[in-house]
């Protein structure tokens, strides 16, 4: 579809912004747009004056605002001269979607995350240099000049896990109307994100728990009425605590413990309570110390015994809660953090928090531990052959929904049928991931298990709560989410909200 023309009413006063999220498995280009804040000019004191610019998808056609290439940018570590060809389809898509007359006003960011962080500084510099050169020579989009940050300033760089978490926090509170002005009387949402390699938390401590504020990040946003709001946010990330790397650590620990007690003629078969009954996977110990026996480095067979309770016990030690705490308040792995008052602070979890709750259990949204545990115990204890039969049936019949009920003529005729989004690796790892998520929430972060999923007492203003209620979202202590309306919760949205806010005149 060609870009909108100058005479298009939708285009009038519209600004655009582009973010390329250069992740470990691929790079995703997203186009956002918002109305020029100077043309909005809300009346002083009106509700609109206490809101942020409305950032939305940047194309008229919903499908065209995002496009992706694979694998990750970091895969070019040994051939940085291939960066141009890698980025060409992404840049070409943005050029085609945004009116040429607006290119020079449209900021373009390429922000790299996990995969690029793992490269050597020399490899990082080579790829960023090639990226910068390609973007400025093959487009007229707005890109920073050279600075101490890099060859394209802040436009092309590797962001930290903390920045990623902070942008996610901004996105969540933007979508949930957590920013309402007069911030000293509002309660913002906390943000939890879990990927395959790492997990992050971002939240605004209550005034009583801020301490000297030296470990808090200052967030400044300008509302449409010109008021600048300030929030002090704590953000931290745990590498190795994402679901995939946690599983690798778990396998290493399980094999180490098995080898410590094995008899001479034992086979390399390790019972695994975190796999459904009868599922057998061949695993190699990735996260182990120097092998203490010739068997240690062998490939072992992990055989599922299907006990969620035992899986919870076996994975809890991976949180390193016994690590010394430098202060009175620590989260998992000895990370100092301001104390969290769960009567006041309410959290939204994305990515794996959503997938592990929704795709099998059908329990995405407001979190109820009793319900979650019941679903996990049931799933983990199932025979793998039975799970496979259900999976094959759902694939053939294209059933929708989570692990819920299939009805016919108003009657339940079958349960346990999954939608087409559920693939075998998800089913294999669901028991482990369900236990890991629960342990991180309750043992790692200290969230109480028994809580009212419909809402808890709060302090401060009710504005945020009322806005959430209007959207039918309530105010539970924790809820997993993927979208709000039709907008995905992504850190890239948070970055664009920050950029759009900078355009509001004081």
Image (cartoon, rainbow, N blue to C red):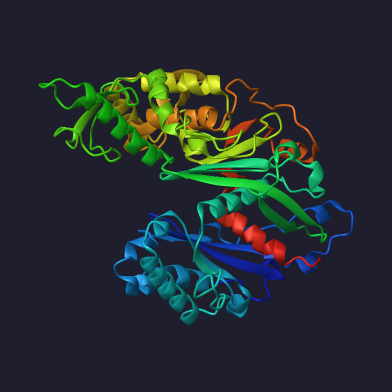
Q: Is residue 6 left or right of residue 65?
A: right
The answer to whether residue 415 shows anywhere in this view is: no
What residue is drawn where x is 69% and y is 33%? 474
What residue is drawn where x is 66% and y is 69%? 15
What residue is drawn where x is 60% and y is 58%? 495
**Residue 298: x, y in percent?**
16, 36
Residue positioned most to the bottom: 137
Is 503 placed above or below 461 here?
below
Residue 49 sits in quarter: bottom right
**Residue sitting nearer the eye, 173 or 63:** 173
Residue 485 sits in quarter: top right
Is 318 placed above or below 9 here?
above
**Residue sitting nearer the eye, 132 or 240:** 240
Task: Count every numbered label the image shows and give the total.
Answer: 0
Q: Is residue 190 left or right of residue 120?
A: right
What residue is drawn where x is 16% and y is 32%? 293
**Residue sitting nearer the eye, 98 or 230:** 230
**Residue 410: x, y in percent?**
52, 20
Is 278 placed above or below 183 here?
above
The answer to whether residue 89 shows anywhere in this view is: yes
**Residue 494: x, y in percent?**
61, 55
Q: Which quadrant: the C terminus?
A: bottom right
**Residue 292: x, y in percent?**
20, 33
Q: Is residue 128 left or right of residue 260?
A: right
């Amino acid at each position: 579809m060609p870009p909108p023309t100058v005479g298009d009413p939708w285009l009038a006063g519209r600004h655009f912004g582009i973010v390329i999220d250069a992740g470990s498995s691929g790079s995703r280009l997203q186009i956002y747009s918002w109305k020029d804040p100077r043309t909005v000019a809300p009346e002083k004191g009106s509700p609109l004056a206490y809101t942020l610019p409305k950032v939305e998808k940047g194309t008229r056609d919903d499908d065209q605002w995002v496009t992706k290439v694979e694998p990750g940018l970091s895969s070019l570590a040994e051939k940085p001269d291939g960066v141009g060809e890698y980025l060409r389809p992404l840049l070409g898509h943005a050029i085609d979607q945004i009116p040429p007359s607006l290119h020079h006003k449209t900021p373009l960011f390429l922000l790299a995350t996990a995969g690029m962080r793992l490269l050597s500084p020399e490899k990082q510099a080579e790829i960023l240099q090639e990226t910068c050169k390609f973007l400025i020579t093959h487009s007229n989009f707005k890109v920073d000049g050279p600075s101490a940050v890099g060859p394209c300033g802040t436009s092309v760089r590797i962001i930290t896990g903390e920045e990623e978490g902070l942008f996610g926090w901004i996105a969540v509170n933007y979508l949930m109307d957590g920013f309402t002005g007069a911030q000293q009387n509002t309660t913002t949402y906390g943000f939890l994100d879990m990927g395959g390699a790492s997990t992050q938390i971002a939240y605004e401590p209550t005034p009583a728990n801020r301490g000297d504020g030296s470990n808090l990040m200052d967030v400044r946003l300008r509302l449409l009425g010109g008021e600048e709001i300030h929030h002090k946010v704590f953000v931290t990330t745990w590498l190795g605590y994402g679901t995939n790397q946690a599983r690798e650590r778990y396998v290493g620990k399980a094999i180490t413990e098995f080898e410590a007690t094995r008899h001479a003629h034992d086979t390399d078969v390790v019972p695994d309570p975190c796999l459904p009954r009868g599922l057998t996977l061949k695993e190699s110990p990735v996260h182990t110390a120097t092998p203490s026996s010739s068997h240690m480095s062998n490939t072992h067979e992990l055989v599922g015994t299907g006990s969620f309770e035992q899986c919870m016990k076996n994975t809890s030690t991976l949180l390193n809660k016994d690590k010394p705490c430098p202060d009175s308040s620590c989260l998992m792995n000895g990370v100092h953090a301001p104390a969290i008052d769960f009567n006041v602070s309410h959290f939204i979890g994305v990515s794996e928090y959503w997938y592990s709750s929704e795709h099998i259990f059908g329990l995405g949204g407001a979190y109820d531990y009793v319900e979650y545990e019941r679903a996990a115990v049931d799933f983990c204890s199932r025979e793998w052959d039975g799970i496979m039969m259900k999976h094959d049936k759902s694939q053939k019949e294209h059933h929708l929904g989570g692990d819920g009920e299939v009805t016919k003529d108003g009657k339940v005729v079958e349960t346990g049928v999954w939608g087409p989004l559920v693939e075998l690796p998800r089913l294999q790892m669901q028991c482990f991931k369900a236990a890991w998520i629960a342990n991180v929430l309750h043992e790692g972060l200290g969230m109480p298990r028994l809580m009212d999923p419909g809402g808890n007492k709060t302090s401060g203003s009710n504005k945020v709560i009322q806005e959430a209620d209007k959207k039918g979202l309530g105010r539970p202590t924790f809820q997993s989410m993927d979208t709000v309306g039709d907008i995905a919760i992504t850190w890239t949205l948070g970055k664009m909200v920050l950029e759009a806010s900078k355009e509001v005149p004081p």
